[in-house]
Image (cartoon, rainbow, N blue to C red):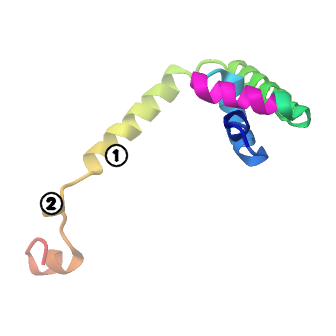
Amino acid sequence: MTAADQEILDAAELESLLPWHAAGTLSRGQTERVDRTLASRPDLARRLMLAQRERTETIGLNEELGTPSARVLATVLTAIAADASAEQSPADVVTPAARDSGDSMA
């Protein structure tokens, strides 16, 4: 087996990289490995076409959703603030038993 043969990905590896290949976010080395694999396995090239089509459709659907309203933003920010204020350090937590006895962290 040559070094180039070792750079060929198996079908599972290839499939896991296709979404990132379709988006153009793989490193140059990863892109070259995917391209070599696709060149040696034309039957797998269809999977890239499907990944590209899925990416295009997903982007289109998300763009059709439009921008959230100001009310939605306010709701999200309020929920974030409530969540942040609900986070307490362990020293601030009062267990039920401690609450009943008046002590904290019993």
Q: Is residue 36 magenta?
A: yes
Indicate the amino acid at tag 1: Asp
Front in this rendered view, residue 94 or 35:
35
* Sequence order check, earlier mark of 2 and 1: 1
Secondary structure mostly seen in the magenta stretch:
helix
Residue labelled with disc 2:
92
Note whether 5 is above or below 99 in the view shown: above
Front in this rendered view, residue 32 or 6:
6
**Element assignment for label 2:** helix
Q: Position of residue 11 (x, y in %)?
A: 78, 45
**Element assignment for label 1:** helix
| Residue in the image at 67% along x and 23% along y | 23
Within 10 angstroms of label 1, few (less than 14), some, or many (20 or more) residues?
Answer: few
Q: Where is residue 62, by image quadrant?
A: top right
Question: What residue span does the magenta drawing correspond to?
Answer: 26-38
Judge from the rendering whether residue 101 lies leftward or rightward of residue 65; answer left or right. Answer: left
Judge from the rendering whether residue 62 lies leftward or rightward of residue 42; answer left or right. Answer: left
- Counting every numbered tag in the picture gives 2
Q: Position of residue 86 (x, y in %)?
A: 28, 51
Note whether 15 is above or below 87 in the view shown: above
User: Taking the image as drawn, is residue 48 in sight?
Assistant: no
Note whether 59 is above or below 19 in the view shown: above
Q: CA distance from mark 2 to mark 1?
A: 15 Å
Q: Where is residue 26, by image quadrant?
A: top right
| Residue in the image at 14% along x and 77% along y | 98
Note whether 70 is above or below 84 in the view shown: above
Residue labelled with disc 1:
83
